[in-house]
Image: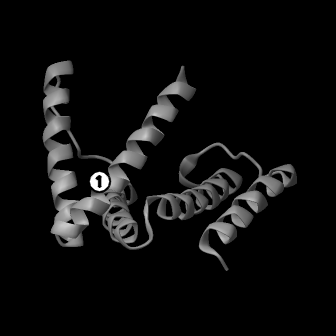
Amino acid sequence: MIHIILLLAGLCLGLMQSLNGQLAIYLEIFEVSFLVHIIGAIVLILCMKLTTKEKIHLTGLPLYLYSVGFFGVSLVAISSFCTSHIGATLTMSLSVLGQLVVSAMIDHFGWFHKERVEFKLKRFPAYLFIVIGLVLMIGW
């Protein structure tokens, strides 16, 4: 079931990235990011109010966890800009490669209090195929 949910999340991400690229035709990059985040915040507040009776509390977290807001704004702004210039497929492909690399590092070194999942050399060919695919897409 989790695989299906992740597939749906990926579909949503692809749709969002393409639509953000369209928004970038009409709005400045930071306006796109603001619009995405304000609509998201409204939807989340409504969902939280409908599903839970508890108060929303966002305090008491380690300070570095608040950086997710910066990363969210950066992701929307950068992907919107790139999608409007190089297309959704190449933008998403390069983004996925970046996600794979940083995720492998987080797993391997156990950053952010995560359980270590050591990088195995048998995964290297998969990364190599992704890079080869990107090289073919870019046309280098």
Image coordinates of residue 106 in percent, x first then y, are: 61, 55
**Number of marks in picture:** 1
Q: In terms of secondary structure, where does tag 1 sit? A: helix
The answer to whether residue 79 is above or below residue 58 is below
Q: Which residue is mark 1?
A: 19
Q: Quadrant of the N terminus?
A: top right
Q: Report the side of 12 relative to 3 (left or right).
A: left
Which of these two is toward me, 6 or 15? 15
Q: Report the side of 123 relative to 70 (left or right).
A: right
Image coordinates of residue 105 in percent, x first then y, are: 66, 59
Q: Quadrant of the C terminus?
A: bottom right
Quarter-of-image position of residue 86: bottom left
Q: Report the side of 106 relative to 42 (left or right).
A: right
Q: Residue at x 70, y 65 (%)?
A: 131
Pick out the residue farthest to the bottom: 140
Under mark 1, the amino acid is: Leu
Let me know if residue 52 appears in the view. no
- How packed mark 1 is, by other alpha carbons closer than 10 Å (few <14, some 14-19, many 20 or more), is some
Q: Residue at x 19, y 28 (%)?
A: 47
Q: Residue at x 80, y 51 (%)?
A: 123
